[in-house]
Image (cartoon, rainbow, N blue to C red):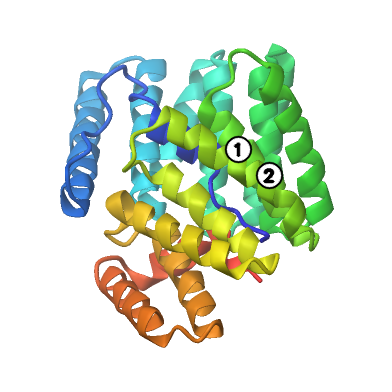
Amino acid sequence: MNVRIVPVGFLLLFFCSSILGQPAPARGNSVDSYREDLLHRIAVVAEGARQAERDKVGDIQLARIYAELGQLCYRAAQWDRSESAAKRSLLLFRRAGGAKGELAVVLSQLADVHIAKGNLKESEKEDKEALKLREELGDRLQIARSWEELSALALRQQRFQRAKEFAQKAVEEFSTNTRSTVSDRMAAWLALSESLCGLNECPSAIPFLKKSVDDAKAALRPQDFPIGLSEFLLGYAYWKSGEISLAEEYMRDGTSGMDKQLGWGHPAYVAALTHYEKFLKENRQMEAANEVERKIHRAEAVVDVGAIQSGQGAFGFAALK
């Protein structure tokens, strides 16, 4: 299951408030309202950036606004816009000097965007610079986040042993570091699970995916998408391990859970549906497979197909076996 599913920045973006301390986008009661809230928040922050430019605020403050804009655009699968905002933030942080921790976060953010766009060399360069900055600061938690990010990059490069080694280091640190978050642990468990499946050891990935599901259910609301994402991946691991009935249960529940917030056409959701459809057809469940295919077509009608295809690389589904 060599997957680049959830870069830690993506999960952190979901769990946290905005960089400026303002509320994160409100979560509506439907897929449409959830997306509308996100697009509204993007518009608000973009206008805030324009106003800050006009007011000539300090570089650090402006850099934080652009970092937030880049994160929100990434969440909405607006890759080019996210890249532009992250680059602007990076330039401002560099010009201001200092703020190494925030600079490392933006570098990691830009690395995720470059994976989405298929620029793996640029992504590796940015992830390595982020790690170097975090090592200079001596912050073990931030260093472990870089390990997870390098693991995710290695998965995209199909360097599974390297991915496994980085993920194991991240798992070990997050399991003992009292400042680690549920998103840290989930991202590391998923990266380790994905690398194991890439090495044809999917049965060994199942315990880590179970932990991810349990942690997500304990920390989040039932409709929050990381629960569905973890359940889908657990189902995929069961599928590749020959546990067909369990695979169907978790892939069905997982894609249904992802639909609640990502069903507007997010690449991670479309890619999950694509593999669920493949599973159903392989197991001769044609009526269910046709329904899933219809969902895929509806989602593709909302989001640009090019964004979906490139985004599948960002979330690793392009590498699923």
Q: Secondary structure at mark 2?
A: helix
Q: Residue at x 27, y 59 (%)?
A: 264
As drawn, the label of residue 192 is none
Q: Is residue 66 above or below residue 114?
A: above
Q: Is residue 279 above or below residue 93?
A: below
As drawn, the label of residue 207 is 2
Is residue 239 in view from this perspective? yes
Q: Horizontal and vertical percent for residue 17? A: 34, 24
Q: Nearer the viewer, residue 57 or 269?
A: 269
Q: Quadrant of residue 150?
A: top right
The quarter of the image holding the C terminus is bottom right
Q: Residues within 10 Å of mark 1 (few under 14, many from 20)?
A: some
Left or right, 43 with respect to 213, comes to left
Which amino acid lies under the numbered mark 2 shown in the image of this protein? Pro
Which amino acid lies under the numbered mark 1 shown in the image of this protein? Lys
Q: Horizontal and vertical percent for residue 30? A: 18, 50
Q: Residue at x 46, y 66 (%)?
A: 271
Left or right, 215 with respect to 259, comes to right
Q: Horizontal and vertical percent for residue 286? A: 42, 87
The quarter of the image holding the N terminus is bottom right
CB within 8 Å, label 2 to label 1: yes
Q: Residue at x 24, y 42 (%)?
A: 38
Q: Horizontal and vertical percent for residue 196? A: 76, 53
Q: Nearer the viewer, residue 18 or 290?
A: 290
As drawn, the label of residue 211 is 1
Q: Nearer the viewer, residue 73 or 28?
A: 28
Is residue 154 in view from this perspective? no
Q: Residue at x 49, y 58 (%)?
A: 250
Q: Nearer the viewer, residue 207 or 72?
A: 207
Q: Is residue 35 above or below residue 185?
A: below
Q: Residues within 10 Å of mark 2 (few under 14, many from 20)?
A: few
Q: Secondary structure at mark 1?
A: helix
